[in-house]
Image (cartoon, rainbow, N blue to C red):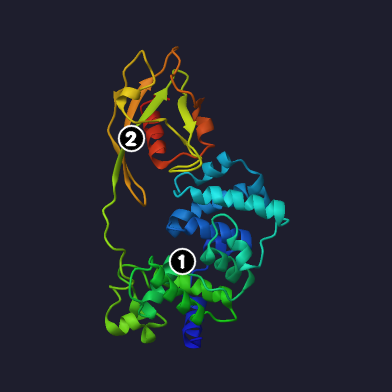
Amino acid sequence: MDSSFATALLSWGATEGRSELPWQQDKSPYRVWVSEIMLQQTRVETVIPYFERFMQAFPTVCELSQASQDSVLGLWSGLGYYARARNLHRAAEVICQQWDGEMSRSREALESLPGIGRSTAAAILAISYNQPEPILDGNVKRVLSRYCGVEGWPGQSRVMKQLWSHAERLMPQTECGAYTQAIMDLGATLCSRKQPNCSNCPVESSCVAREQGRVEELPQARPGKKLPERTTYMAVLHNRQGEVWMERRPEQGIWGGLWSFPELDSVEQWPVQWSAPQQREKINHTFTHFKLEITPLYGEVGPSAIAMEEGEWVTLAQLEQRGVAAPVSRLVQQMRKEQLI
């Protein structure tokens, strides 16, 4: 183990690290777990209000396990990557039904839960239980790629294997929680992706990237790949009672378990026989693996039945308690602005 790295980080973290974040005030395994899941591919400032609302609604893991999926997804709406919320809910059920409401101190056991990988399990154990389990989130990957001079894109298995090896080597056996927080803070504040503040870095003198003048180059970017594009139509239906027609999406696939306007392959699938749809401005939404172009088709439904097998009329008050995807939320807000609902 390179003890100088841990010593320098611990000293820096004690005076310069972050200590005001809401999940740092009570480092229970449950709170650490929820924060780690929310922080995956999401910025801290975005997560803070979601975390606070979530903890207020579900202060314990068993209260989360007893909640409906709709209420969990409702509090997650706008945070994205909704499989995280569904996995969090399912894992909470396992913890309360099979583990008596206590999170295990075994990394292997935690990794058996839905949505918990090695790094998340390690963060729970290091921060809550002070166990020497190294983590490898996005910030830590960047710090270690630069400090150790690791070549390649961190998403490659070869590169990940090297990074895990360095993470294990540098992990101290004591003060594990403080060290874990410090290395995450270093990546989030000084060792940032753009314009890193190397002059104030506590490990600058032994950083390979700094020594070789490759700080801006490492970690190397993902090989370029153009995202495929898809198109869809959405039937944005409302009635004179101020309700909208919604359906719950399948568990598998994009926006799994969320409520959405029905998707159509073409205008010809418009479900209201007695009136033509009003086509509105397209909405573009980018996912990790593709881009989606949505064409909204508006229509008011009177006494005639809708030719759709699934779905229900939903009020705004009901909708606020359910999870909806970002483009759907945009359409609902536009309808409110136009006083259609």
Q: Secondary structure at mark 1?
A: loop
x then y, percent, for residue 246: 47, 29
Name which of mark 2 and mark 1 comes first in the sequence.
1
Residue type beneath disc 2 = Thr
Image marks 2 and 1: residues in contact by CB distance under 8 Å: no
Q: Nearer the viewer, residue 320 or 339?
A: 320
x then y, percent, for residue 128: 62, 68
Is 179 above or below relative to 27?
below
Q: Secondary structure at mark 2?
A: strand
Residue type beneath disc 1 = Asp
Q: Nearer the viewer, residue 276 or 32?
A: 276
Q: Quadrant of residue 331?
A: top left
Label 2 sits on residue: 232
Rendered residue at 54%/31% (across/down): 318
The tag on residue 185 is: none
The tag on residue 137 is: 1
Q: How would you rate the neighbour count of disc 1 (Cα within 10 Å): few for under 14, some for 14-19, many for 20 or more?
A: some
